[in-house]
Amino acid sequence: MTAFTYILMMYSIEDLISVILSKSEQLEELAMQNTDLKNLTAKQLHCIELIHSMENPTLSELTEKLKITKASTSVMLDRLEEHGFIRKVKSDIDRRSAHVHLTDKGHKAAHLHAGVHRQFAALLTKNLTESEKDILIVLLNKAIKSIQ
């Protein structure tokens, strides 16, 4: 393949993002297809992932990370609780607030989601050298700073 041919095959940033998001969604759907997680939305999965990483956050802490309203977070948590993914535990210190805990089912969902991320990262970087992977990490870190 010549350098000219390679340049003609390059995608625009918009096309790259579209391909990455689409493939990520496909992997997620495939992983969840034969589980009791198949009815979770992407936002709900993200919420479960955050609860796992934040280790039992309060509603306010979760709302801040999700960047949605408290009411929307509350509705989402109610649905996750109805389906057995989370439970709300009143704070021992302040009875007005509650911490969100994952149930066993919630931990299963978080681990499945993390596994899909690992699988996708492996697919995305399988044709890269270690040096190229390092460069990609640096560039993606630099790029996401503008959207956080």
Image (cartoon, rainbow, N blue to C red):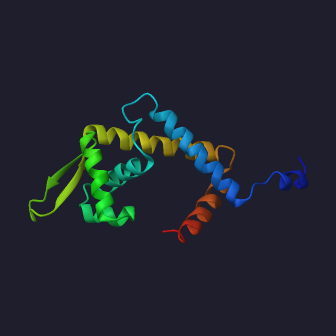
Q: Where is residue 27 in the image (x, y as percent from the top left)?
A: 54, 39
Residue, far bottom = 146
Q: State whether residue 18 is above or below residue 39.
A: below
Q: In this view, does 126 lie to the left or right of 94?
A: right
Q: Which residue is drawn at 49% across and 41% down?
A: 116
In the image, 146: left or right of 76? right
In x, y percent, where is residue 123? 61, 42
| Count of numbered labels shown in the rendering | 0
| Residue visible at 29% across and 37% down in the picture | 105
Relative to residue 75, is residue 130 drawn left or right?
right
Name the one closer to the observer, 27 or 114: 27
Instruction: Please report the residue visible at 75 percent of the width from the left and 54 percent of the height from the top.
Output: 11
Q: Residue furthest top?
A: 34
Q: Position of residue 8 (x, y in %)?
A: 85, 54
| Viewer-nearest residue: 72 or 49 | 72
Q: Where on the picture, by quarter, is residue 17?
A: bottom right
Name the spot of residue 4 as percent of width and height, x first. 90, 55
Q: In which quarter of the image is residue 23?
A: top right
Going 50% across and 46% down the picture, which residue do you hit? 117
135 sits to left or right of 10: left
Q: Judge by depth and name the residue closer to the eye, 12 or 134.
A: 12
